Image (spheres, rainbow, N blue to C red):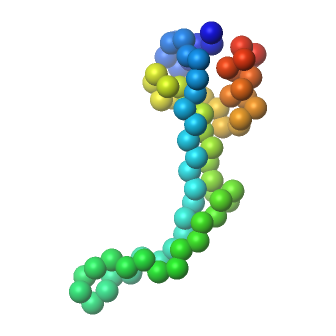
Amino acid sequence: MPKCPECGEEIDSLIYAYEVQIEGDLCLDDDGNLEYGDTTTNAGVGSKYEYSCPKCNAPLFYEEEHAFRFLDGER
């Protein structure tokens, strides 16, 4: 079983996180309330994929291929 290079714990899975960049307008109306204007999601542009240790949450890989190799015991 592979060990996390950060904490040294044996792990058999990784945490997968996907972050998407969202752009849009945020305005304050006359009553002091926040209003959202047009928003766009730029999947792929500024997006971040991360594979982390389930024990210490340290980010270990940013590419799926490397994460699978690690879990398969390849370095």
Q: Quadrant of residue 64?
A: top right
| Residue 17 image position (x, y, % from top left) | 56, 41
Compared to residue 20, the image places residue 53 above or below, namely: above
Residue at x 69%, y 21% (from the top left corner): 70
Residue 69 horizontal side relative to residue 61, left or right? right
Residue at x 25% of width, y 82% of height? 32
Residue 5, can we see it? Answer: no
Instruction: Give the vertical position of 51 relative to 36 (above or below).
Output: above
Relative to 17, 69 lies left or right: right
Q: In which quarter of the image is the C terminus?
A: top right
Residue in the picture at 64% in, 32% down = 61
Judged left or right of residue 66, residue 33 is left
Q: Residue 21 appears in which quarter of the rendering?
A: bottom right
| Coordinates of residue 41 in the picture (x, y in percent) | 60, 66
Q: Which residue lies furthest to the left in this view?
A: 31
In the figure, residue 20 lies in which quadrant? bottom right
